[in-house]
Image: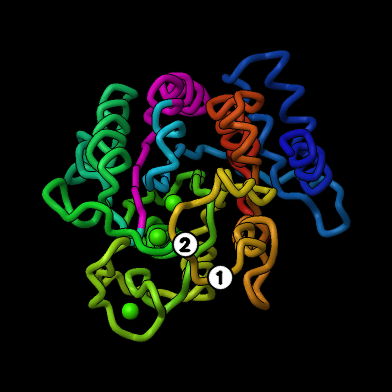
Amino acid sequence: MGRHLGILRAMQLPHLALALTVIGGCGPASRSGADANSNPGADGGTTFDAGVCEDVVDVVFVLDTSSSMGFVLSQLESQIAQVVSASNTLAPNAHFGLIVFQDNHFIDNTGPLDGGVVHTSATSLQSAFRNYRMNFTNADRNPGDGVSGPTTQNPICEENSLDALYAAAESFPWRANATRVVILVTDDTFLERPDNYGDRDHDGLTNKTDFPREGNYPAAHTLVETVDALKTGRIRVFSFSRITQPSFLARCGTGRRLPWTDITDGWTTPYGAQPPIPTQTDGGNYDLDQVKNGSLSLSATINTVVLESYCSPPIL
Ligand SMILES: [Ca+2]
Ligand SMILES: [Ca+2]
Ligand SMILES: [Ca+2]
């Protein structure tokens, strides 16, 4: 998938090969110079404009912390320093955000800036990844409920990536001159308003207390609303999701609202009539199973997409 995306993006952005070549030869200092020609012409040729790109880098992680996702949080904890370093090599003072979700979401507030929602170093991100893995993933607890929230309250497999993405678009303090990238990781699809993630049997009530217990976790947004917010914010979404259905034994242990064949919907296949979110935001998708089996590096892939996005506004 990575090579495929790279080829696709290189075809979409003819300046890219030039920019990468210049970087390879001369180092990051020449990056803004190479990107002065970052507007592909309508004919696919390269337009040289007078401006020099002086973007900063804003990257927001939107992570599914449900019980099957511990390996992602562990890998990010061990690899995040390489991502922070690479982003700061593109442009000094990179900002990072973290939004975690299961049936609801939480905007992490343990960073040093903007009331905690902006991280600038690997250290505080590592602590945050560890915290969500131990207190939410391993405890099967929804992150929006806090550390004293109820456990085993996730009665259907779909997870609320959509409202977490909406929060990334609307609530993160994106800087005006930032190249804006969301890295989303999940292994399932999502629901839209007016559905409720806590309504296990879809009877409109959330009052069943037998396992897996129901709870009131309403979906707040639709896909169209979320994509509109991302597009307005010029935010590319790069997702890591499953490309293929898991075997029976590797499946989420509860029931689900949508068929297993729909787990790719919104990421690599359309969601209803809507194209996938990465397609709509000029991002891309990678195979989460390759991350899980060790054949795709999270940090190397993230660094590649941030580099490819840098000073190249999404083509929408
Ligand atoms: Ca899950
Ligand atoms: Ca769920
Ligand atoms: Ca119900």
Residue at numbered disc 2 = 158
Colour pattern: rainbow
Q: Report which quarter residue 42 is drawn in.
A: bottom right
Q: Tell whether 303 sits left or right of 178.
A: right
The picture places residue 6, in percent across and down from the top left corner, at: 75, 37
Furthest residue toward bottom: 204
Q: Quadrant of ligand 3?
A: bottom left
Q: Amino acid at mark 2?
A: Glu
Q: Are marks 2 and 1 in contact (CB under 8 Å)?
A: yes
Vertical relation: 192 (above or below) 107 = below
Query: Which residue shows up at 47% across the image and 19% down it?
Result: 82
Instruction: Determine the CA span between mark 2 and mark 1.
Output: 8 Å
Query: Which residue shows up at 29% across the image and 61% down it?
Result: 211
Residue at numbered disc 1 = 258
Vertical relation: 281 (above or below) 182 = below
Q: Is mark 2 within 8 Å of ligand 2?
A: yes
Comparing 138 with 65, the one in front is 138
Q: Tell whether 32 sits left or right of 157.
A: right
Q: Report which quarter residue 215 is drawn in.
A: bottom left
Name the secondary structure under disc 2: loop
Name the secondary structure under disc 1: loop
